[in-house]
Image: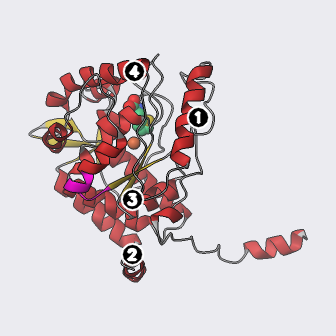
Amino acid sequence: RSRVGASAATLEAPPPPQIPRTLSEVDNGKLLGFGADLAEDHPGFKDAGYKKRRQDIGHLARGHEVGEPIPYLEYTPEEVRVWGTVLRELRQLYPSHACKEYLSTFPLFDFKEDIVPQLEDMAKILRQTSGWQIRPVAGLLHPRDFLNGLAFKCFHSTQYIRHPSRPNYTPEPDLVHEILGHVPMLANPVFCDLVHQIGLASLGANESQIWHLTKLYWYTVEFGVVREAGDIKAFGAGVLSSFGELKHMASGTPALEPFDPFMKQPKMSYKDGYQKRYFVLDSFEDGASKLRDYCASITSPELIKEWRAHQSL
Ligand code: TIH
Ligand code: FE2
């Protein structure tokens, strides 16, 4: 093919993004970052047994079909120990560090230190509280696929456990993060509605809008904090699932700024440790309404209406 032809083609508008009509059409195979292979700076990089385990669990996730129950996994004694350690330590910080919405749904799950929760059991509870579903995934998804999943009220979740050498902080999502960070928040219908807005807005979004939505997701759902009676409390899952980060958040060291979805959002840091700044919501309702306004500003009501019509078929 000639170069001339290729450059002529670039003058045309890029093709519109593919909008998934069913959850099965959301690609859960394309992985980013640590998903496929562990990087040199990953705590499990030199641990062949750990890598093998990750691959086996990832394989199960890839074979999962939408609508089927999520396969139960038998966790090893070492994995159970990691889960139990994190739960024991975090549980001590939650009453003083977690937002009230988190504290109110947390007891529904009846977490035990000697039993790693099964995604399928978590999914059953979410079905009854918020109507959300969980789909297992082998690692970090491409942002468009992950955000599109949210439009289907589906949360893509990893099923492997962080490396035992560093239970207090991991640079990527793992089952402990999904369960202690995301699941209790996803049992709150008001919070779910906020997350759903981001998902719906992602359906027809162009690349730069996807990138902005990813950052809005990052600074709220992953690392958001909320003001409660003059204190700062965590609702972001990346904070709630890390003993180190939860203490860091409350230490007075990181910068705190008001959350404004219309502003250019700072670069996200995935690998370089705790967040240097957190974005603060005045209240949960206020943050949800700001996000709603932003998402409405980039969404075409016709597109959403047409997409919803397909959903009921
Ligand atoms: N840092 C979190 C933890 O240790 O639980 C995991 C992550 C959340 C988001 C990105 S990495
Ligand atoms: Fe997460």
The image quadrant where one finds the C terminus is bottom left
Q: Nearer the viewer, residue 163 or 62?
A: 62
Q: In the visual, does 63 lie left or right of 98?
A: right
Q: Earlier in the sequence, mark 1 or mark 3?
A: 1
The image quadrant where one finds the N terminus is bottom right
Number of residues whose C-alpha sits closer than 10 Å to that of mark 2, classed few (under 14), some (14–19) or many (20 or more) = few
Residue visible at 33% across and 29% down?
116
* Part of the protein shown in magenta: 126-132
Number of residues whose C-alpha sits closer than 10 Å to that of mark 4, classed few (under 14), some (14–19) or many (20 or more) = many
Query: As displayed, is residue 267 above or below residue 39?
Result: below
Q: Which residue is mark 2?
A: 311
Q: Earlier in the sequence, mark 4 or mark 1?
A: 1
Q: Earlier in the sequence, mark 2 or mark 1?
A: 1
- State if disc 3 and disc 4 touch (CB < 8 Å): no
Looking at the rendered structure, the kind of residue marked 1 is: Gln
Residue 81 shows in this picture: yes
- Count how many numbered circles sit on residues in the image: 4
| The residue carrying mark 1 has its beta carbon less than 8 Å from ligand 1 | no
Q: Is 128 inside the magenta-drawn segment?
A: yes
The secondary structure type at the circle numbered 4 is: loop
x%, y% of residue 144?
51, 59
Q: Which residue is mark 1?
A: 55
The label on residue 167 is 4
- State if disc 1 and disc 4 touch (CB < 8 Å): no
Residue 287 shows in this picture: no
Residue visible at 45% across and 53% down?
214
The residues bearing labels 4 and 3 have C-alpha atoms spaced at a distance of 28 Å
